[in-house]
Image (cartoon, helix red, strand yellow):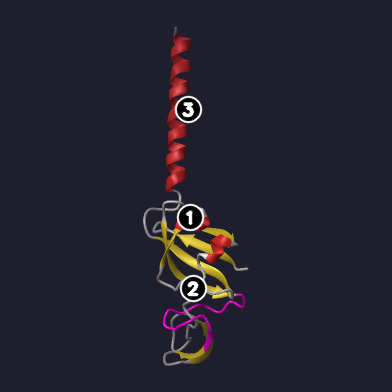
Amino acid sequence: MAEFKVVVSDETGHTEQFEVDGQDANRFIGRELGDEVDGGAVGLDGHTLELTGGSDEAGRPMRKDVAGSNLKELLLEGGVGYKPSRDGERKRVTVRGRQLSDETAQVNAAVVDGTIGDDEDEAEEADDEEADAEDDEEADADDE
């Protein structure tokens, strides 16, 4: 059974991590980096998530330019999976393909529409307004 950690971020830089397993995790199997999925799988109903990256159990990064979900050794000059310390330096690095599979441990995603805390902020504002209205009524009753 598949199990992921899904790290979701929005355009404000706010990030939250969700544990996903079972049927919700199966929604991610077979998807590729760049695909959009429904946020309901991680409890963000009404939001759309874009898959932006991920890694496997060993920490190997996923790359968009590698097809499938298998491991592949690439000679890299930079980019995802390797940061050279000098100009022209290259290194052979093992990376994983762009397709999510059972071997995937972490999935990175970005909220396409809105921010993560939209629903919570609206609920808090409504509660604050109700509390203010009740305080005003109590103050008016005390004045009389």
Which residue is pictured at 42% across the width and 41% down the height? 122
Tell me the crowding category of disc 2: few under 14, some 14 to 19, or many 20 or more residues within 10 angstroms, Cα based: few
Q: Give the amino acid type for the residue marked by disc 1 in the picture.
A: Gly
Residue 64 among magenta residues: yes
Tell me the crowding category of disc 1: few under 14, some 14 to 19, or many 20 or more residues within 10 angstroms, Cα based: few
Which residue is pictured at 47% across the width and 27% down the height? 131
Stretch of the chain drawn in magenta: 57-72
Element on which disc 3 rests? helix
Residue 26 among magenta residues: no
Q: Is the Cβ of the residue at disc 3 closer than 8 Å to that at disc 1?
A: no
Q: Give the amino acid type for the residue marked by disc 3 in the picture.
A: Ala
Tell me: residue 115, above or below residue 123.
below
Mark 3 vs mark 1: give the one in front: 1
Q: CA distance from mark 2 to mark 1?
A: 18 Å
Q: Which residue is mark 2?
A: 30
Which residue is pictured at 54% across the width and 74% down the height? 101
Q: Is residue 14 visible?
A: no
Q: Is the Cβ of the residue at disc 2 closer than 8 Å to that at disc 3?
A: no
Q: CA distance from mark 2 to mark 3?
A: 47 Å
Q: Which residue is mark 1?
A: 40
Element on which disc 1 rests? helix
Q: CA distance from mark 3 to mark 1?
A: 30 Å
Q: Earlier in the sequence, mark 2 or mark 1?
A: 2
Q: Earlier in the sequence, mark 3 or mark 1?
A: 1
Q: Is residue 8 visible?
A: yes
Q: Earlier in the sequence, mark 2 or mark 3?
A: 2
Q: Give the amino acid type for the residue marked by disc 2 in the picture.
A: Gly
Q: Which residue is mark 3?
A: 131
- Between residue 51 and residue 38, name the one nearer to us: 38
Q: Quadrant of the N terminus?
A: bottom right
